[in-house]
Image (cartoon, grey):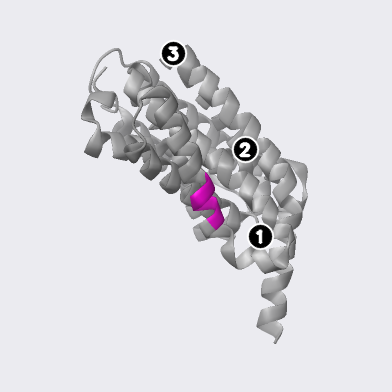
């Protein structure tokens, strides 16, 4: 009974955050979609801005010790990740990403060594910083596809799926629908992906997969992070919303690599 009550409390907390989160996701997806259509450089600028937002609120979202050091590591590491792909003028687009990620990870551990507060909650601090860098790294995977029309179409399908899942989360305000939120998110994301695919490419099949996968991934991240107590405040909500968009960057890249290799060979 206690566990059931705790689950309902967390679900109520997530439900209250669903409206501002949907607004954040909607705005971020539109910005990144417009940037992707404008070109790889503009998309890189948009992703860099997202990295700044994530770094700005990451420590507060998880209540981490040493917030300044965390901000510095996530900010510098995130911008280096974006820059490692943005500076590439030809394939392989991700050639410098392993080196950039390795440097960011080293910085995360050096930050812990240099702390002077007794280093409480070291494991939580390191794992949270790695998670923040993973969010930005997933977003960076949007850049390779932005060089081709097919890649942009896949990216727009994924962004549409993420946006659709955020708005289906609003149905969680009704308790009877909460067990169906994942299914509703996937259905909404699939419909959004198909609409983008038919509009831009004339093919619904691959975009159905993109929309469903992006919606499920985005919704899952919000479901996990949306239960944090700090999400009742504006800055953590902004971070969670932005992260739930960045995380879908892996979807168009993997789908393109498997089903539409020409989308990554601009």
Q: Nearer the viewer, residue 48 or 4?
A: 4
Element under label 3? loop
- Main SS of the magenta segment? helix
Mark 1 and mark 3: span between their CA atoms? 36 Å
* Residue located beneath label 2 in the image: 25
Q: Residues within 10 Å of mark 1 (few under 14, many from 20)?
A: some
* Residue located beneath label 1 in the image: 227
Q: Residues within 10 Å of mark 2 (few under 14, many from 20)?
A: many
Disc with the residue nearer the chain's start (2 vs 1)? 2
The answer to whether any part of residue 65 appears in the image is no
Residue 39's tag is: 3
Q: Nearer the viewer, mark 1 or mark 3?
A: 3
Element under label 1? loop
Q: Nearer the viewer, mark 2 or mark 1?
A: 2
The spot of residue 56 in percent (x, y) is 64, 35
Residue occupying the point 49% across, 42% down:
191
Q: Residue 230: say if magenta.
A: no
Residue occupying the point 51% across, 58% down:
183
Disc with the residue nearer the chain's start (2 vs 3)? 2
The spot of residue 125 in percent (x, y) is 54, 53
Residue 259's tag is: none
> How many badges with numbers are in the image?
3
Q: Nearer the viewer, residue 114 or 55?
A: 55
Numbered range of the magenta stretch? 184-188
């Amino acid at each position: 009974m206690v566990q059931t009550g705790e689950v309902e409390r967390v679900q109520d907390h997530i439900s209250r955050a669903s409206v501002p989160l949907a607004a954040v996701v909607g705005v971020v997806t539109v910005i990144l979609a417009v940037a992707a259509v404008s070109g790889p450089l503009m998309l890189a600028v948009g992703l860099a801005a997202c990295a700044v937002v994530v770094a700005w609120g990451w420590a507060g979202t998880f209540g981490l010790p040493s917030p300044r050091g965390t901000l510095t590591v996530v900010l510098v590491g995130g911008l280096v990740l974006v820059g490692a792909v943005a500076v590439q003028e030809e394939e392989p687009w991700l050639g410098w990403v392993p080196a950039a990620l390795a440097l960011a990870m080293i910085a995360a551990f050096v930050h812990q060594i240099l702390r002077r507060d007794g280093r409480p909650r070291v494991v939580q601090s390191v794992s949270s910083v790695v998670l923040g860098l993973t969010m930005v790294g997933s977003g960076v995977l949007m850049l390779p596809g932005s060089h081709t029309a097919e890649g942009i179409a896949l990216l727009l399908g994924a962004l549409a799926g993420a946006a659709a899942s955020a708005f289906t989360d609003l149905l969680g305000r009704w308790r009877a629908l909460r067990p169906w939120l994942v299914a509703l998110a996937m259905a909404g994301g699939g419909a959004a992906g198909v609409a983008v695919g038919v509009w831009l490419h004339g093919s619904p099949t691959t975009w159905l997969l993109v929309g469903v996968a992006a919606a499920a991934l985005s919704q899952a991240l919000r479901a996990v992070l949306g239960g944090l107590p700090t999400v009742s405040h504006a800055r953590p909500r902004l971070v969670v919303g932005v992260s739930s968009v960045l995380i879908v960057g892996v979807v168009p890249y993997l789908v393109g690599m498997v089903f539409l290799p020409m989308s990554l060979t601009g």
